[in-house]
Image (cartoon, grey):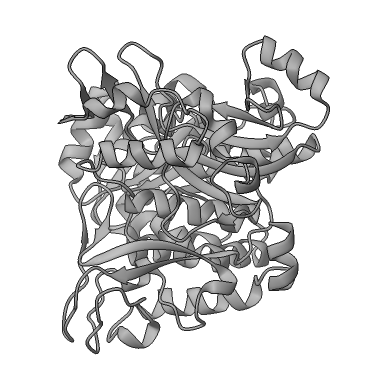
Amino acid sequence: MNLHHLFAGSGDRTVRYALSGAGGGFARTLLAQTGRTGRLAPAVLCDRDVERLRDMLVELGHQPDHVAVCEKADEVARTVAAGSVALVADGALLTAAPWDILVEATGSPAEGYAMAREALTGGRHVAMVSKEVDSVAGLHLADLAQDHGVVYTTADGDQPANLIALVTWAELLGLDIVAIGKSSEYDLVFDPATGSVTQLDTIVSAPALAELLSLGDDVRATLAARATAVAELPVGATADYCEMAVVATGTGFRPDVERLHYPVARIAELADVYALREDGGLLHRPGAVDVFSALRLPGEASFAGGVFVVVRTGDPVTWETLRGKGHVVSRDGRYAAIYLPYHLMGVETPVSLLSAVLHGRPSGGTDPRAHAVLGGRALRDLPSGTRLDMGGHHHDVTGVQAVLLRDEDAPEDTAPLYLAAHATLARDVRAGALLTLDDLADPDLGLLDAWTSGRVSRAPRTSSSESSASR
């Protein structure tokens, strides 16, 4: 959709947004892009460190006298009415002035949910960046949006929205999708000259990769050998599992295994790697959502945390023609990978905001369902009274390994990972055990209610057996 179509029929209206978690990295990319988009403007921005937020806005080109730190509702209302941007530390002040859509980017399950609920029940749209909120309360928030005649949407620029949109496009074309997914956040860059692999700022020795740069005849054996070669590097970021949980609810594609496969793979190999096992690939069944670790050489283009779909090819002549044009087709010609090697964070988000407000359309899927559960398994014995703190870049939960379960494989009392975050254990949990709702002494009651009601109202439309056959 181009800008002409986005603005069609809207006159000269400017879309105004509120933004929570406004001091974060995603928020900055959106604020920086807003001034370049036109007819889109921030109204109220919320962050705990409002002075740092104010400095950032001035750095981005806002006039200092058009940015005001506000501590009371009437100050917020006056500031926005005057055409300036109100900065608040208290999320309760977000709704003190008129705006069209909330961009929720706190990453806080309970606080983000409360802000999104307040916006939707007040008749305002919500673009959800906080996957932590969406993985617990997304289904209930979708219900609230429907009840109040507004839009609840993932945000373009984050992998969930981009992948859901790619799947929607592929399904519209009638492509037979076998697997969907994304790459992990940072590539594995192998330097044959030194025999080392660099992942962001970590370098490890992995000389065995020199003999593993092609898949060979046994794809699974090669992938296993690569995993061994880079075993010093961490695999399976909590954020990846959370994002794929959001994608599962939006598409119906579900995990093939609960820890996901995380193959170390080159871009040109995706169609061979994500083939069914009977065709030499990884997948036990079609309809998988997964994450891979992108392997490349220095100077080769990055997958940049982008997204992909793998499809059955059908007509061999068509896809041999496309192979000749550089598209990724498996060696046996049965599968092809189609991918977008980017996610531009808030630089892309204006599309979601304008589409939701001006056209009443969410990004990607329109009917989320309870297809998967983002749960957690204890990494060690956790005694009663343990507080499950959440922290770090990937919002890990202390002592807990994120897992993604197919809906029919998750016990009814499974605790969603980000409901468990910040909760205290009511009883001992043994290493390897899946966290349950009864394990939590003090879960946030609003989130708990959202989790249970959303899963009841938005259960999958097909039975588990039918769903397993189709996905």
Task: Write down the quadrant of residue 174 in the picture.
Answer: top right
Instruction: Residue lying at the far front in this picture: please name it.
Output: 217
Q: Position of residue 254 (x, y in %)?
A: 58, 57
- Residue at x 26% of width, y 36% of height: 229
- Residue at x 63% of width, y 36% of height: 310
Q: Is residue 99 above or below residue 329?
A: below
Q: Note whether residue 341 is visible.
A: no
- Residue at x 29% of width, y 68% of height: 421
Please give left or right for residue 396 compared with residue 103 in the image. left
The residue nearer to you, when weighing 429 against 123, is 429
Q: Position of residue 337 (x, y in %)?
A: 61, 30
Q: Is residue 302 above or below residue 378?
A: above
Q: Position of residue 33 (x, y in %)?
A: 42, 25
Task: Write down the quadrant of residue 79 in the picture.
Answer: top left
Q: Note whether residue 182 is visible.
A: yes
Please give left or right for residue 405 compared with residue 396 in the image. right
Q: Position of residue 362 (x, y in %)?
A: 63, 46
Task: Write down the quadrant of residue 428 in the picture.
Answer: bottom left
How many numbered circles does the render carry? Answer: 0
The residue nearer to you, when weighing 427 against 448, is 427
Q: Is residue 331 above or below residue 307?
A: above
- Residue at x 57% of width, y 28% of height: 339
Q: Quadrant of the C terminus?
A: bottom right
Q: Quadrant of the N terminus?
A: top right
